[in-house]
Amino acid sequence: TIDDKSFNQGAWEGLVKYAEEKGISHQYYQPTEKSTTAYLESIDQAVKNGAKVIVTPGFLFEEPVYIAQDQYPDVTFILIDGNPHDADYNYKTADNCVGITYAEEQVGFLAGYAAVKDGMTKLGYMGGMAVPAVVKYGYGFVQGAEYAAQELGMADGSIELMYNYTGGFDATPEAQNQAASWYNNGTEVIFAAGGAVGNSVMAAAEAAGTKVIGVDVDQSGDSDTVVTSAMKGLEQSVSFGLDKHFGGQWADVGGTGTSLGANEDAVGLPTATWSMENFSVEEYETLLAGIKDGSVSVDADYESGLEQAYSNLTLTIE
């Protein structure tokens, strides 16, 4: 869809903005189902209709783009949040393609740190499918909460963090019920990193009078419960790829995977719209500068797993 108020919509709106500013024709194609065949059919339709550059949002397009980049060598592919691979996870990025990924662990860290600094001690993380981007968000969130607790000199186990992957990116009664259960048991805020899963978490938070941390884009307008959002620069990323294509600089990125993070201003929290009460913009900017210069270390090795030693944080994985 292009109306999920999250990742897909953010990428589409970035494309629309760029195309309208440059006077370039543009169109969206929505696959009939979640399958490689359906995605390839939509790509084929776009090419038949004259598309010269195709932007695909999300990891589900990794395998289709792997195939399409060879089928349509004269078409440019900008794969947002992934890199092309076949069904056996053999990766290859052709010269007419670029894969753009993000340092989600960095912005997850910022969100976890902000929640604890703002005074919250009972946190939750509800991700969608356990794909790299979602896992990295959660991995960073745990690190940030632990780091803030240490900085504040809190006692061991002062932070309680509930953690779960729903297994999908849809709003479901099950996700809402689980979020409601966490809130009823004292969780103060849930970081919802799963597309429309966030709608379920927001509904539960609205009923409980609690808080949510949004994801991918600034979701403060979606619900009064959203205190901040862990954002990716989707608009900037789409513009980055389109600029390379239309600006004659495609050779700089074609055939590569590009990771964007704090140093590229591609991840961060929306300070203009957040409703933090005790965590200041100045504190946030100091932390962000520390991540950029390396003085604040955020572990990117999410594959090492969550089940490690934490001193200030008690982690419960459901």
Image (spheres, grey):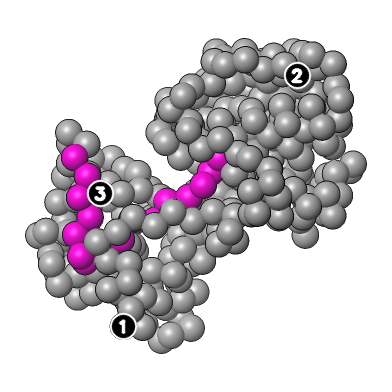
Figure label count: 3
Comparing labels 2 and 1, the label whose residue is closer to the camera:
2
Q: How far across and how far down the image is residue 229, in percent? A: 66, 46
Q: Quadrant of residue 30?
A: bottom left
Question: Who comes first in sequence, dot 3 or dot 2?
Answer: 3
Secondary element at tag 3: loop
Q: Earlier in the sequence, mark 3 or mark 1?
A: 3
The amino acid type, in three-letter code, at marker 2 is Asn
Q: Where 74 sits versus 288, above or below?
A: below
**Amino acid at dot 1:** Gly
Does residue 185 appear in this view?
A: yes
| Pick the front one: 262 or 51 | 262
Judge from the rendering whether residue 306 lies leftward or rightward of residue 19; answer left or right: right
x and y percent of residue 121 in the render?
80, 23
The residue at the point 40 percent across, 33 percent down is 131
Cα distance between the residues tagged 2 and 1: 51 Å
Task: Nearest to the eye among marks 3 and 2: give it.
Answer: 2
- Residue that numbered label 2 is attached to: 312
Helix or strand or loop: what does disc 1 sit on?
A: loop
Q: Which mark is on residue 84?
A: 3
- Span of residues in magenta: 90-105
Residue 108 in sight: no
Q: Residue at x 32, y 67 (%)?
A: 253
Number of residues whose C-alpha sits closer than 10 Å to that of mark 2, classed few (under 14), some (14–19) or many (20 or more): many
127 vs 247, nearest the viewer? 247
The CA distance from mark 3 to mark 2 is: 39 Å
**Classed neighbour count for the residue bearing mark 1: other residues with Cα under 10 Å, few (<14), some (14–19), many (≥20):** few
Taking 157 as reference, is 302 above or below it?
below
In the rendered image, which residue does mark 1 sit on?
248
* Badge 3 amino acid: Pro
